[in-house]
Amino acid sequence: MALVEARGVVKRFGEQTVLDGVDLEVEPHKVVALIGASGSGKSTLLRCINGLEALDGGTIRVDGRSVLQDDIKLNRLRRDVGIVFQSFNLFPHMSVIDNVMLAPRKVLGVSKADAADRARWLLDRIGLADKADAFPDRLSGGQQQRVAIVRAMAMRPKVLLLDEITSALDPELVDEVLEMVTDLAHEGMTMILATHEMDFARDVADKVCFLHKGSILEEGPPAEIFGSPRHERTAEFLRRSLEGRSR
Amino acid sequence: MTGAQGATRPPYGRAPARARAFAVASLGFAVVGGIAAAIRSQSTDNDWLAVFLLALPLSIAALYYGRHVETQVVDVDGDEADEAVARTSRRIAVAAIATSAALCLGLAIWSAWDGLQDVGDTFFSWENIKSSFPDVVEGFWLNIQIFIIAEILVLGWGLVVATMRRAPGRAAMPLRWFAVVYVDVFRGLPAIVTIYLVGFGLPLTSLPVVSNPDLSIDIGPFHLDQLACLGILALTLVYGAYVAEVYRSGIESVHWSQDAAARGLGLSRGQSLRFVVVPQAIRRVVPPLMNDFIGLQKDTALLNVLGVLEGFNIARIYAGNEFNLSAVTGLGICFLVITIPMTRFADYLVKRDQKRLQAAGG
Ligand SMILES: Nc1ncnc2c1ncn2[C@@H]1O[C@H](COP(=O)(O)OP(=O)(O)OP(=O)(O)O)[C@@H](O)[C@H]1O
Ligand SMILES: [Mg+2]
């Protein structure tokens, strides 16, 4: 059974229909990459899956649990769905380790000692153990994003949503973050990532979905999408993003 | 090469000598003025001495001219002797400035002497301050009690109003409206009008609690009668409106994705507010909050219109009886002792938190 299952998802902001009947299935331990032009609705779709936006139509189920706009159920659902944004992820008034410990302690009720142990272990794995007591402003952008991922992982989510987590970073900091995501993929983490990094999507994703004007125009294994796209629009989008990169 | 000297005149010509003459003249003018002032110090008809005040601008001009000339000489690698003359003229001009400044100050103090003595007697009579101070301080203690209690109430009430204003959903519409109207009204009214209406109006009604003449606060060191309590209520209403807005802008100044990040981690709306949004908002809120508190502390003096015997009222009574305002000066000092450190503390907090909160973007 699919871990994440979206059926005919519709989302409007005022007059504008941002998502117009999106169908998406994500199997456990698979990585799905969402690609598409700016404004095509990638972020909105991720936010809907996490219940941060109310749906105007369709259904989304995560691990069989429906994403309803019911606060209590949503809080429960979000434990299973981690999300990391492009920027402004870390809480600037807390040290790195407090950032990581906050949700396990307050949401899962883990004891302080246990939460700290696990946080240190997680930070150690990404080589940031020595930054545990630093505040976010002392970290580079890449380090901040890696801590944000660790913080999401501390909740042991079933699926992780990553929304263009490298697009606010300086180019030389991108790789360390992508490497970390690749490691997570190899460990079998289920992930949905919105990205402009086509090479990365090709390497790490099991399935690539091309979003166009609020619906998934084309989806398939990366080799297929990048090698022989069926739709003219997909081909054009890929051509453009290749041009953009070589510039 | 003596012949060449007369033939080629340097481009700055006789400017160094002129600069020196100018400086000497202004110094002379200042000195003459000083001597004249000293000689005429016993006479009453001294208005013409004011002419010598011109010595100050003259000597400043001489200084600038001297510098200008010296620059010219140095620029063309001119005669060293000329350079020395220009430098001397600068030094003389500095001396002239010092002399004429002393002269101006002397003349100013001298001519205003009687007036200054009056100022000293009226505002800073040590006798008066000393004799009134114990009573003024006792009155000021009431101001302190009032603002401490009012500040605590304002902190809570402002938060309630700010929360109402941000309450989500259609059902909360009346709450939002109440908050908007309340804030508009009490920020718009002069504080003294609110104090007057509350202090004199509510006792005339048959409302519970507030119209009860036995209303009082007696907790620990706090002893407040009905009028003082109504004053606190009025101040709370006024400053609650300001502080509600301070809270609101503080909460709104926290980037929305901070809430999204917290909610995304599974924190409930309340938890996100409590652990993520409010702690950051507080750091941004403290400086404007401190300002409002300083305003509130000062406005406790307005309660004198109700007849509350706080510091200003007592100092005013003293001032009326003695025909001397020094008691009020004493009260002013009491206020400053509290408000100045508070302002400094607020500045310190801002400095401490600013960097950390700004830096955590990407
Ligand atoms: N809260 C909101 N209110 C109104 N409109 C919104 C809101 N959030 C997103 N939109 C609009 O929805 C559309 C899709 O936005 P979305 O952020 O999902 O695009 P995206 O594919 O993630 O783009 P990008 O690659 O630039 O991040 C945009 O036109 C955007 O202006
Ligand atoms: Mg986006």
Image: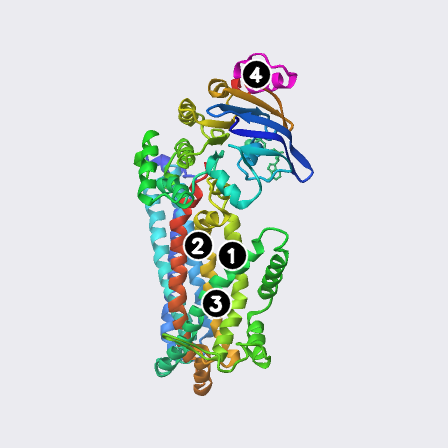
Mark 4 residue element: helix
Pinpoint residue B133: horizontal percent, then vertical percent: 36, 80
Q: Residues under labels 4 and 3: Cα distance?
A: 66 Å
- For this orientation, the residue located farthest to the top is A228
Q: Residues under labels 4 and 1: Cα distance?
A: 52 Å
Say which amino acid is labelled 3.
Leu
Pinpoint the chain carrying mark 1. Answer: B
- Horizontal side of B44 relative to B161 (left or right) equals left
Residue A225 tag number: 4
Pinpoint residue A231: horizontal percent, then vertical percent: 64, 16
Mark 3 residue element: helix
Are circles 2 and 4 on residues that touch, CB within 8 Å? no
Where is ligand 1, by quadrant?
Answer: top right
Are circles 4 and 3 on residues that touch, CB within 8 Å? no
Nearest the eye: A77 or B125: A77
Q: Let me know if marks 2 and 4 both belong to one chain.
A: no
Q: Earlier in the sequence, mark 3 or mark 1?
A: 1
